[in-house]
Structures are given as structure tokens and as C-alpha cells.
Amino acid sequence: MDVAKHLEKAAEAVRKKNFDYAVNLYHQVLQLKPDHGEARRELRQALFRRAEYKKVPPLISLLQGIHHLAAILVGTVLRNPNQVVLAAEAYLRHDPRHRGVNRRLAEALERAGHLNSAVAVWESVGDDERIGDHALKRAGMLYYSLKEMQKALACFETVLKRSPRDSEAEKMRKNLAAEGVLSSGSYDPSRSSRDLARDKAQRPEASGERAPAQAQSEAELLRAKLEQALAQNPADKRARRGLSDHLVRQRDYQAAAAVLEAGLALDASSYELSERLGDVRILDLEERLRDARARAAQGDEAGRTDAADLARELREFKIEEFGRRAAEHPTDLDLRFRLGRLLLEDEQVDPAIESFQLAVKDPRRRVDALLGLGAAFERKGMLDLARRQLETALESVDPAAERGTEIRYTLGVLLERSGDRAGARRCLESIYEQNINYKDIAVRLEALRSQEQQEIRTQAAAGAPAAEAERRADVRDDREGRSTYGIKD
């Protein structure tokens, strides 16, 4: 199937108001690629438009889909996310705005490891008056996991515009600021990636219509305005926050730090200001580290030395900063996870284990925390404990999804290292059966097979002629080949 052509045909069908045909095309794509975010997003919009064009009474929708609701319930009880996804999509054909079913669909897609599809569903209900804020925060967290920081930030900023006192959205916005993400404005979940790409290309900035001098002048005016507001009222936290954010966007981190330090001098107990100051110092260190690495890449020996020193300083400061935050907010499990990851990178294995063991209680971080525990136990040589973490993590995702495949591969390598060659082969062969080109899977399996053959020949040769040992090895190879393809003797 040519997915791109299917999507183009579906989009054309929507433009011609041939919604049923478009919906069927989108479902065909999703049957083949269940984590195709764009197809899932455009399917939602096609269903919404069809519902507006051809309204169905709620009672009729309920009667048409009541057996799908029952299937959703059964799939939820049995913890079968794929069943929930199929039943929910079938129900939403008749009632696409049903907030409960959309929520179940998004949660099931997350559990199945289809994060791109899950974020598309959460976004589709981002304008719902009852669950919109929750949906956009979930979408923002998924974008964060997918490393799409601009989209994550846009989701949280949209929530804050509607609910300025939402502490969770504000916390994530600050976390993203700490990672150098600049504001990109409110996110519109109703638009496809093709629409966004086309709009970006049409912006004046993209075409060069906005002169650099004009942009610089506007930035200077905004800075002057914010500085004046703060000079008139040093206790104005909103102006201080606005000025520090503006300076961060201009990459003037030292000036931003000075603004925040002045605020802390007035209110030393402000957790918000101290957290922002920590974020700005991290950004400053990261910028200096990039510069040092760039110099080192050009052969500058001083740059190489500076890069090593700055990398160590950045790592130590992050551990100190997130350790302080975690101590002040012991129930913030996301902070615990981030601290655990930093500690593991710094080879502080036991403290990292302690942080991951707390973070595993957070459903959003459970799988990542289990993988962190597995890596930490492996570094301590506790391979059985590491294996258990990976197996538990695998139970929480769809084994056939990309995340599940990655975990199975890691588990196979761990089993190989621990000496369980049979277990390693089973694990790696389950991936090989689906994707022969995954990483170095073919090479690893061949190495395992050669080791086992050599071991058989060595053992057989110790009590039997070489020819007999060779024959036994060949018989075993033949039987294994038969079992691999489901052929029974």
C-alpha cells in the first residue's frame, strides 16, 4: 500500500464531501500502520465534518454502537488495548465527539505504545469544554516523550491561556523552558501536518519579508517596556517572569539570571523564581558547552578541554538542581524520574535506583522508570533483577509496537549477556520474524547459532566420534529450521 497516495485520496474525498469513502481509506492506512499520527488525526477531522454535514440523533448513535461500547468495556477489563482501539474506532464512526469513548481510545493507544496516534486523539478533543485541558496536557506529555518540544510547549501554553492557574501546565511549561524550547504560540489541533507545513512556508519570516533589523527593533522595544514595568514595581512577578522569558528567547542568559536573582533578593522563599533561575543557568551552561564542542570539532585543543569541563559542570549542576527540587516536592514523581536519569548518567547507580523506584509509581513514567531500573541493575551486575524490570515493562506496552520491539531487543541482549542463550534466541527471533533488518538482529542470531553448534560438537566429540557429533549437530539444525517455520516432525 502506498500510504501517501491513500492519504491524498482520502483528503480529496473529504473535500468532495465523500466522507464515507475517506473514512474507509483512513481506516485502511491505520490497519497497516496503527501509529500513523497524521492518518489518525485526519480521520478524526473527517468524522467531525461528516457529523456536521449529516447529523445523527444521539439515541440512534447509541443504538448503533451499543455492542461496541460493550466490547470497549470487555477489552478494558481484559487489559487488551488493541481490542479497545478497534471497538472505540467502530463506535466513533457514528458518534465521533463522544468524550468518554475518545478518552478510552487515546488511553488504549498509549498503552499499546502507539504514541503518535494517541496524541492525535487527545488533540482532537482539546476544545472539549469538560476534558479539553486534560486532553491537551496529555498531548503535551506525549509530545514531550516523542521529543517534539515545540508542540509540547504549545499544548501547555494553550491550557494556560484558558486556565492560567493550572499548576501542572505551568510546571511543564517551565520544564520545557529549561530545555531551551522557545514559545511557538497556541496549538491548533484541528489542522494536519501538511497544513502546518504550508502555513510555515507562507509566513513572512519564512520568505524573508520581515527584515532582521525590524525583528531586532521589536525585541528591543519589548525589553524596554518590560524593564520599565519592573522598575516601576519590582514586586510585579508577571513583569519579572515576562522579562526573564524574553531574555531567554534572546539567549541573553546572564541578563535573565540577573533579573531572577534580583527577584529572589526580594523574595528568597519563591520556589518559582529559584526554579526559573536554575533553568536559566542550565541553558547558559548548555550554550557554552555547544560553543566549546564546536571549537573542539575545528581542532581547538582549548575547546576540547573546555567542553570536558563544561560537560562535567553541567551534569553536576543538573543533579544538584533537580535534587533540590525533588527534596522540596517529594510527591513530584516526574522530578524523581528526571533526577534518576541524571544520576544514572553520572554513574551514581544506587541513588538512581532509589529515584526510579519512586518514579515507577507514576503511570506516565512507569515504563521509562522500569527501563531505568533495568539499566541500573545491569550496571551493578544484578542481571536477574534487570531482566525482571524489562519483562515488567514489556507487559505494559504492545510487544509488536516500536517501543515493545525496542524492549524485546534490549531483553534479548541482556539474556545473551547473562548466558541464557536459549532465552536470548527466543526473544531475538520474535523480532527477526517481524523485521529481518532490525538493528544487528541477524548478526546476533547467527552468532548465537554458531556458539550453540560449537558447544554441541564439543560436547558430542567428548564421548563420540567426530562424525557422530557432526551428525547430531546437523540433525538439531534441521529440527530448529523446521520449528522456525512451524513445520512439525
Image (cartoon, rainbow, N blue to C red):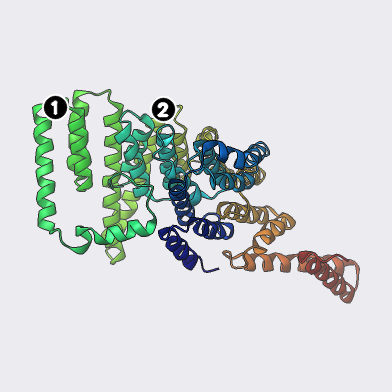
Examine the rendered structure and indicate whether residue 393 appears above or below residue 233.
below
Q: Tell me if 145 is positioned left or right of 209 in this view.
A: right
Q: Residue at x 30, y 30 (%)?
A: 164
Q: Earlier in the sequence, mark 2 or mark 1?
A: 1
Q: Residue at x 54, y 43 (%)?
A: 105
Label 2 close to label 1 by CB (< 8 Å): no
Residue type at mark 2 is: Ala
The quarter of the picture where the C terminus appears is: bottom right
Residue at label 1? 234
Q: Is residue 325 left or right of residue 413?
A: left
Is the residue marked by circle 1 packed among few (<14), some (14-19), or many (20+) residues within 10 Å?
Answer: some
**Residue at 34% across, 53% down:** 308
Q: Which of the 4 image quarters holds residue 299?
A: bottom left
Farthest bottom residue? 467
Numbered-mark total: 2
> In front here: 61 or 180?
61
Residue that label 2 marks: 327
Q: Position of residue 457 (x, y in %)?
A: 82, 69
